Amino acid sequence: MTPQPRFRTVLIDPPWPARGSGKIKRGAQRHYPLLKLDEMELTIRGCPHWAELHYCAHCYLWTTNTYVMAAGALLEDLGFRYITKVTWAKKHAGIGQYFRGQTEDLLFGVRGPGKHPSVCTDRRDLPTLVIADHVRDARGCRVHSAKPEVFRELVEKRSKGPYLELFARTQRPGWTAWGNADDLLT
């Protein structure tokens, strides 16, 4: 029996592969297992909740600057039409071989009939640039790859639930979380 559509909005924060860091592990690979690009779509579609995603849905897909083109292709491969992006401007620069990464993008896509699938809320005053500090743990240290809560709040303001988060690192009330990268890849 096929599950009935349930989720109207999905937020995905994939464990993108490391690139260009050589033998020194400086980025994400120090914190959790990473996926290869050719495994990304299959892993996402392998989520047991993916079949419960409504045919009219919104998708928010996090990407680093290195993978912005691959993220756009992944969004399309997952059946969503790219609309725009929200940029997280970090207060502190990160790593990078050419430029210090100080932003991450949240690609926004839709699927469903018509120009504006019925998943939208009435909010139209939301920013596409959010300046926020890194998430910090109890000791005050930055938590690698953790996104500020303001982004989930932004999703909730613009897109209707129920909400599904893939590669979740925390649980939020009202959201179904699946696949902390550590749980999926070990």
Image: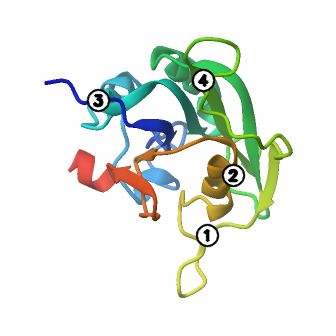
Label 1 – label 2 distance at C-alpha: 16 Å
Q: Where is residue 105 in the image (x, y as percent from the top left)?
A: 68, 40
Residue position marked by numbered label 3 in the rendering: 4
Local packing at callout 1 (Cα closer than 10 Å; few below 14, some 14-19, many 20+) is some
Badge 2 amino acid: Leu
Residue position marked by numbered label 4 in the rendering: 110
Which quarter of the rendering shows the N terminus?
top left
Query: Are discs 4 and 3 less than 8 Å apart at CB?
Result: no
- Write down the quadrant of residue 133 in the picture: bottom right
Badge 1 amino acid: Val
Q: Is mark 4 on a helix, strand or loop?
A: strand
Residue position marked by numbered label 2 in the rendering: 154
In the rendered image, the vertical position of residue 92 relative to residue 77, given as above or below: below
> Which mark sits nearer the N-terminus, 2 or 3?
3
Badge 4 amino acid: Val
Question: Do we see residue 176 in this rendering?
Answer: yes
Label 2 – label 3 distance at C-alpha: 26 Å
- Write down the quadrant of residue 158 in the picture: top right
